[in-house]
Amino acid sequence: MIVARDAGHACGYKRLTMAHAHAHNHLDHAHAHGHGHGHAHGHGHSHAPKDFGRAFAIGIGLNLAFVGIEAVAGLAYGSMALVADAGHNLSDVLALALAWIASIAAKRPASGRFTYGYKSSTILAALANALLLAVAIGALLFETVQRIMAPGEPQGMAMIVVAGIGIAINTATALLFLRGQDDLNIRGAYLHMAADAAVSLGVVLAGLGILVTGLAWIDPLVSLVILLVIAWGTWGLARDSLTMGLLAAPERIDLAEVKAHLAGLEGVTAVHDLHVWPMSTTEVALTAHLVMPGRPASTAFLRDVAHGLEHRFGVGHATLQVESGDEPCGVPCGADC
């Protein structure tokens, strides 16, 4: 719905014009709709494949079994690199579980006080994963330092065999999520497993180094390198999830460019009260006031705006308020005269 302001009624609404905007993306089946009371709305919906529940279940089962095997082998053969990798894999099992739970919750419809549904649960899952990783890093760092001070005698061949199994399992799990790269939550699961495969490769190389040189300190050294890799990923995850939790505009969206895009629309002379924020790890919302003096917005206009925001900036939920710009106080609606 478009709200047209009448001269003589500062910041008031006297005449309402109904308009409905619809844009359809034939490539990714995303939709944008405009409807409501007093505003024009555009809603985009990203449809990820629906069978990832099975992928999550298989990935969690395989990796949980491997965590037990790797931890036991690491303790039995005196390899902190294996124990560190097991801890990393356990954190990723928890990450997969949280991502799975969040993906299910995000599909629940809006109800009661949760007018946006439970989409933001994916952001909470990312933050929880970062906290779990931080705890795991602390525990593994303590054990690694202990091993540096009192080095054991790790068996290189055992490290190679066990970590080799990890490469196979983590690669297979990553492939389960390969075709869901358009969903950030699924992409995160894929990257976790791909990183695990790379870390397991590092343990294999450590085992080879020990076999060739007989130097036991290679094992805790590789363990420290693994912890640094985990810490780097954890910092990025924590930073991004906290930023999303504070409703900051996604980094990939240039707010100045969005404002310029809206201001450049035919009939628009000014844009104010522009807000962009993440509704979840995959969906972005936008609200803005468009000043259009002497020209009511049409259904076609709303459709084009929703389409442009969806396809150019990835904004799927847009709420636009159109103003005539003729307020006697000379300021936008909502401001004090």
Image (spheres, rainbow, N blue to C red):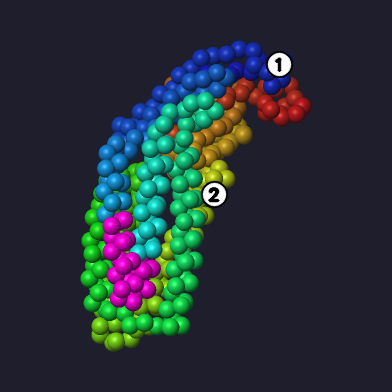
* Label 2 vs label 1, nearer the camera: 2
Q: Percent position (x, y) of residue 290?
A: 58, 28
- Residue 101: x and y, percent? 39, 42
Q: Residue at x 43, y 81 (%)?
A: 148
The foreground one among 275 and 293 is: 275
Q: N-terminal of the two: label 2 or label 1?
A: 1
Q: Magenta part mainly helix, strand or loop?
A: helix
Report the magenta residues as a range.
63-85
In which quadrant of the rendered view does residue 300 lie? Answer: top left
* Mark 1 residue type: His
Residue at the spot of label 1 = 9
Query: Tag 1, which secondary structure?
Result: loop
In percent of width and height, residue 67 lies at 32, 61
Mark on residue 243?
2
Q: Secondary structure at mark 2?
A: helix
> Alpha-carbon distance for marks 2 and 1?
40 Å
Amino acid type assigned to the residue bearing label 2 in the image: Thr
Q: Is residue 125 above or below residue 35?
A: below
84 falls in the magenta region: yes
Res 79 seen here: yes
Residue at position x 55%, y 22% in the image? 39
Q: Does 300 lie within the magenta span?
A: no
**Labels 2 & 1 near each other (Cβ < 8 A):** no
